[in-house]
Amino acid sequence: MDLLQNMNRAMNYIEEHLAEEVDFKEAAKLSYCSEYHFKRMFSFLAGVSLSEYIRRRRLTLAAFDLKDHSAKVIEIAIKYGYSSPDSFTRAFQQLHGITPSEARSHGHALKAYPPMTFHLSIKGGTEMNYRIEEKEAFRIVGLKKRVPIIFNGVNPEIAAMWKSLNEEKIMKLKSLSDTEPFGLISASANFSEGRMEEKGELDHYIGAATTKECPAGMASLEIPATSWAVFEAVGPFPETLQNVWGRIYSEWFPSSSYQQIEGPEILWNESKDTASPAFRSEIWIPVAKNRTP
């Protein structure tokens, strides 16, 4: 697909500039999408952040360069963006398990991370239910907390946020809801770098989408008018939700004419009979039309 071809063009640019500062804006320009979308798409497709990929590629090339005994360690360190031999040695040892000096000797095992390219894999054409919503500006009002990024299992910080909601708080939040998605929602925003390595933190909100003013004592996230891609997930929770979330980035974005723009990722869950294992959820992601090559 065009998006993957464009991203591969950006990957070629990155590969050619590993021995100097990589201009992420230029890489995104070559991919015909925003820097924000380029970084997000890369992290979901590759499973690591763009900065971590570049670090691994540079240290892979550094290991090859160390085999040239005429090159000084400090020269190789500076070539790949390290300001001192000590910082280079720490990074090199963290990846390869040995020091640069040890790497110059034969018989030591080293790690190599080859250049990455992207290809679309056809997996049977399972349908995805989605719609595009155009929304005027609104705000998310409710609880807010900076929480660690955790993929598997229960995030104890988010679980504590939900436990703090008594019936009175829930009814107050629901009374503020006057725009889709209606009712109680969750939203995640301001992700730290390293999301795919389960590093860093994010701002998590539990509240309501509203055009009303934010009451005293509550947090507010202002959201400008934009388009949203809304994906439906129906089935056992959380397996179905996690599956749909992964397919959004690995299948829908690469084959669609949209790119993700900066903004919160919103999750809405339908109220249900807890005796049933099936949940109906909606994932809301802010999007814009791709740039035209």
Image (tube, rainbow, N blue to C red):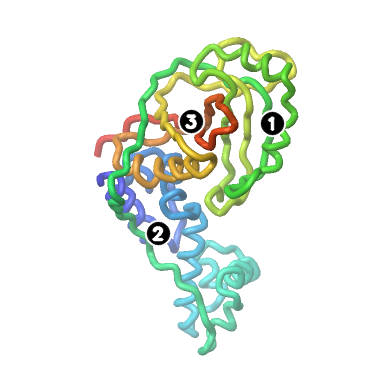
- The residue sitting at 29% across, 41% down in the picture is 255
- The residue sitting at 34% across, 34% down in the picture is 258
Residue nearest the observer in this picture, 66 or 207: 207
The CA span between labels 1 and 2 is 46 Å
The CA span between labels 1 and 3 is 19 Å
Where is residue 124? Give x, y as percent.
28, 49
Q: Residues within 10 Å of mark 2 (few under 14, many from 20)?
A: some
* Type of amino acid at the residue the image marks with label 1: Trp
Q: Residues within 10 Å of mark 3 (few under 14, many from 20)?
A: some
Helix, strand or loop under label 1: helix
Q: Which residue is mark 3?
A: 280
- The residue sitting at 60% across, 67% down in the picture is 91
CB atoms at circles 1 and 2 under 8 Å apart? Answer: no
The answer to which of marks 1 and 3 sits earlier in the sequence is 1
Q: How many marks on residues?
A: 3
Where is residue 245? Give x, y as percent.
46, 41
**Numbered label attached to residue 116:** none
**Numbered label attached to residue 17:** 2
- The residue sitting at 74% across, 18% down in the picture is 217
Q: Which residue is mark 1?
A: 162
- Give the number of the mark in front: 1 or 3: 3
* Furthest residue toward bottom: 106
